[in-house]
């Protein structure tokens, strides 16, 4: 098995066991740090969060995204799929689906299915594509239950777009019309000057041409009364190492990228992750952008633990909540580390919190002192200090979580965490002002 794929599979299993890890983590919190009531509140806070539950449920039962591809021969369907995965995937023909107007494929690597696809095989090209054929194809698509229909149009061509859009409109109507429809303008690298393949070197005239072609496709869709959920220009241009160039100890079925000319692919993946069924979106993220899924889950935990910190900080007794806040923030850091494939002990997490506390005026320790100091206001105006204390505690936990994400999931070095914490605090303060 490819070592990189094996590492990914181990990481997937690790994240897939997150529920059990959290339960064990809460059970292991020493009784002298949080009470049974606080422990139950912590369990309830996690189990009652709908967004987090949807993500964790998706982790239990992820499935490959299912796409219907519409586009003429040479529009770059397989190239797009490979560009999305960053791998040279095997195109495996699946079962017979009962219509000559389409074929069903899986795109695989190392036994892992990345996508399930129905390729309509250029339905706009056929002069004999009649109502019966449309009905047959629509029936196959309904049975397939796709997550999205991807309409592909080559940026360098204008002919036949109207016909293809009309055929797509009819197909959408016959299949219920409620699928996300993504219009993808392919081969934007071939627009003049076509010799420039590096996306960061596209000259302004090429970028302007891309905008013009994208606008043109949007207008055609609008003129024919077909609403595209998104219109995205992409380049799937990738050069792969030839088999002779692959080192003997590498898997020659998995060539590495020799030149990467992809553009717009990240935006396409972002859109799909936001609009697919959660199980398909989780699979997409787990197989293609593992840290994105981990970060998405981590963000929910940051919100949950920040809210819990605010609740804990409302205790009017000076310094009574320090141990609980330390525990909450340690647990948050441990969960985020776990999402990165690492496991921390409570002591290690608390030591890391102390090290983060030494970073600048927005550090953890000084914020904790400030948070406790506000409680002295309660001695004069009962309750007046607690609201401010809750905000500071919540913001501090939010900043700690963001620093943990940066360190464990994005690989930001420790000497740059000062800036991460400052930015996180500004972000939190801005949210507080608008909420």
Image (spheres, rainbow, N blue to C red):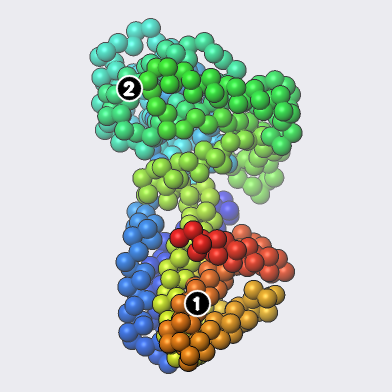
Element type where label 2 sits in the image: helix
Disc ID at residue 388? 1
| Residue 180 image offset from top left, x and y in percent | 38, 34
Residue 143: in sight, yes or no? yes
Nearer to us in this view, 212 or 288? 212
Q: Quadrant of residue 195?
A: top right
Residue 10: in sight, yes or no? no
97 w.r.t. 61: above or below: above
| Residue 34 image offset from top left, x and y in percent | 41, 87
Q: In the image, 257: left or right of 141?
A: right
Q: Earlier in the sequence, mark 1 or mark 2?
A: 2
Q: What is the CA distance from the residue labelled 1 to the residue labelled 2?
A: 57 Å
Task: Look at discs 1 and 2 and give the one toward the viewer.
Answer: 1
Question: Would you say the residues marked 1 and 2 are in contact, meaning their CB atoms lie under 8 Å apart?
Answer: no
Q: Quadrant of residue 175?
A: top left
Disc ID at residue 171? 2
Residue found at the far front of this picture: 380
């Amino acid at each position: 098995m490819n070592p990189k794929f094996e590492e990914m599979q181990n990481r997937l299993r690790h994240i897939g066991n997150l529920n059990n890890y959290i339960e064990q983590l809460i059970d292991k919190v020493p009784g002298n740090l949080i009470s049974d009531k606080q422990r139950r509140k912590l369990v309830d806070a996690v189990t009652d969060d709908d967004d987090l539950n949807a993500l964790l449920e998706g982790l239990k039962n992820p499935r490959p995204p299912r796409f219907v591809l519409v586009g003429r021969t040479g529009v770059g369907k397989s190239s797009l799929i490979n560009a999305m995965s960053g791998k040279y995937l095997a195109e495996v023909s699946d079962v017979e689906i009962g219509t000559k107007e389409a074929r069903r494929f899986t795109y695989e690597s190392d036994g892992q299915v990345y996508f399930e696809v129905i390729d309509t095989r250029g339905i706009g090209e056929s002069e004999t594509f009649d109502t019966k054929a449309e009905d047959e194809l629509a029936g196959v698509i309904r049975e397939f239950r796709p997550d999205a229909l991807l309409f592909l149009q080559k940026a360098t061509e204008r002919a036949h777009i109207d016909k293809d859009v009309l055929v797509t409109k009819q197909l959408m109507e016959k299949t219920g019309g409620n699928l996300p429809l993504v219009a993808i303008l392919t081969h934007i690298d071939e627009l003049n000057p076509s010799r420039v393949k590096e996306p960061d070197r596209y000259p302004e005239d090429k970028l302007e041409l891309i905008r013009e072609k994208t606008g043109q496709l949007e207008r055609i869709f609008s003129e024919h009364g077909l609403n595209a959920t998104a219109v995205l220009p992409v380049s799937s241009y990738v050069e792969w190492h030839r088999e002779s160039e692959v080192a003997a100890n590498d898997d020659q079925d998995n060539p590495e990228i020799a030149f990467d000319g992809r553009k717009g692919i990240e935006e396409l993946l972002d859109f799909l992750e936001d609009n697919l069924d959660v199980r398909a979106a989780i699979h997409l993220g787990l197989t293609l952008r593992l840290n994105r899924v981990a970060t998405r889950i981590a963000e929910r935990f940051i919100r949950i633990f920040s809210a819990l910190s605010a609740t804990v900080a409302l205790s009017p007794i000076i310094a009574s909540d320090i141990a609980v806040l330390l525990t909450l923030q340690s647990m948050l850091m441990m969960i985020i580390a776990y999402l990165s494939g690492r496991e921390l002990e409570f002591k290690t997490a608390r030591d890391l919190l102390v090290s983060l506390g030494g970073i600048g005026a927005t550090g953890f320790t000084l914020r904790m002192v400030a948070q406790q100091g506000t409680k002295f206001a309660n001695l004069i105006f009962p309750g007046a200090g607690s609201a401010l204390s809750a905000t500071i505690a919540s913001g501090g936990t939010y900043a700690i979580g963001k620093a943990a994400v940066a360190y464990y999931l994005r690989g930001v070095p420790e000497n740059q965490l000062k800036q991460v914490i400052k930015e996180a605090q500004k972000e939190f303060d801005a949210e507080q002002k608008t909420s």
